[in-house]
Image (cartoon, rainbow, N blue to C red):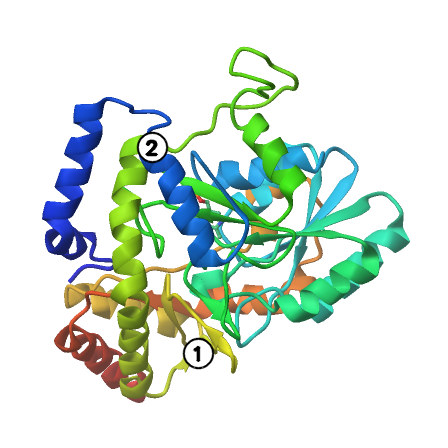
Amino acid sequence: MEFRDLKSQYQRYKTEIDTAIQNVLDVGSFVGGSEVKELETKLSEYVGVKHCITCANGTEAMTLLMMAWDIKEGDAVFVPDFTFFSTGEIVSFRGATPVFVDVDRDTYNMDPVKLKQAILKTLKEGVLIPKVIIPVDLFGLPANYLEIMNIAEEFKLKVLEDGAQGFGGSIEGEKACSFGHAATTSFFPAKPLGCYGDGGSIFTNDDRLAKLIRSLKVHGQGEDKYDNVRIGVNSRLDTIQAAVLLIKLKAFENHEVKDVNQVAEMYNNRLQGVEKQIIPKGYTSSYAQYTIKLKNINQRDSLQNLLKESGIPSMIYYAKPMHKQKAFSELNFVNEDFKVTNELCDTVLSLPMHPYMSSNDIDDVCRIVNEYVCKF
Ligand SMILES: *Cc1c(COP(=O)(O)O)cnc(C)c1O
């Protein structure tokens, strides 16, 4: 059994994907080919925002926004404690300070109450200046943007939606990557919409911001490529990746988001005696991961071993909270401020999940989990 079966997807769309790649090889525009522009248009239509700017990967997409917003030393950026390293890394990379915020016990996403506490604490200490909030759409579920945007407005902060896992999700019909002042996603192969290498993009309705990012991602270009008006980076999506994504986006829209939600529903109905990530009313997830919560670390780890013995892969996202990463050890965090994240890191387990998963495979996973949990 595959954890995320990219081979089945390729087999289903092999002819179209092979033709699209071959076409790029024949035309020879490996960087900046027409597929890139076409993809940006299709992606912005899908998400429902004015601008989509593709780039090299999801991490650089966020870095480009930090550059555009001039985030630097002395600035505080609020990041969930329960996320992939990248979300905090890009803050420190700019010399700014990530302030980690504990998450909600049910949704695993940034807790707005704790966010407000963290902002007030930072203001009271008076060392760092609060600038940006980066909520993460964890495992495919959009964060609580309604409350987070209210807090952002109250304290005049920018919001960057880290939609690396969230692409395809929604809140009341509004698509992920349309929230906040700008959003980013990743096309890493295992993400909800993945390419065949690295890729990422930025979404925003802000014309000036979009223009600035288009300059920053190509060496700070001005009027043309050899007119450089600011210091930037080289961050582009290759034409071959754009060609692959154009095919995959069609499949994503036509059936994959629906299919992956059907798999989730089968899991929800068949799994007994374990807690699951809660999808609140009005929200939909694109299920980058299907994650359950066990009683404690022993129960979780032995279940993972048992699954492994039966040839079923599972993953622990994430075993270590951000505040415990060695790379952030200079930032003195109080472990007690992260009760929920600490608990989640000991108890979560992500099960095989993808739109091509068969009912039989779901049954096999559920049988082992259910038998194990009722004995424990
Ligand atoms: C994958 C991921 C990223 C980074 O994306 P890359 O394309 O791998 O750089 C950022 N944030 C989260 C939450 C992710 O899961």
Q: Amino acid at mark 1?
A: Lys
Where, by quadrant of the figure, is residue 349 drawn?
bottom left
Q: Vertically, is 215 above or below 258?
A: above
167 on left or right of 5: right
Please identify the quadrant where the C terminus is shown.
Answer: bottom left
Q: Position of residue 246 (x, y in %)?
A: 29, 46
Q: Position of residue 375 (x, y in %)?
A: 28, 87
Q: Depth check: 328 or 143 in front?
A: 143
**Residue drawn at x 29%, y 24% as measured from the top left:** 30
Q: Residues within 10 Å of mark 2 (few under 14, many from 20)?
A: some
Q: Vertically, is 289 above or below 278?
A: above
Q: Amino acid at mark 2?
A: Ser
**Residue drawn at x 59%, y 71% as measured from the top left:** 104
Of the two numbered discs 1 and 2 on the same chain, state the one appearing first in sequence.
2
Where, by quadrant of the figure, is residue 62 drawn?
top right
Q: Which mark is residue 21?
A: none
Q: Depth check: 78 or 246 in front?
A: 246
84 on left or right of 192: right
Q: Position of residue 77 (x, y in %)?
A: 70, 47
Mark 2: which secondary structure?
helix
Mark 1 C-beta closer than 8 Å to ligand 1: no
Q: Position of residue 15 (x, y in %)?
A: 10, 46
Mark 1: which secondary structure?
loop
| Residue 82 in sight from this viewpoint | yes
Q: Which mark is residue 34?
A: 2
Residue located beneath label 1 in the image: 295
Q: Residues within 10 Å of mark 1 (few under 14, many from 20)?
A: some
Q: Vertically, is 38 above or below 120?
A: above
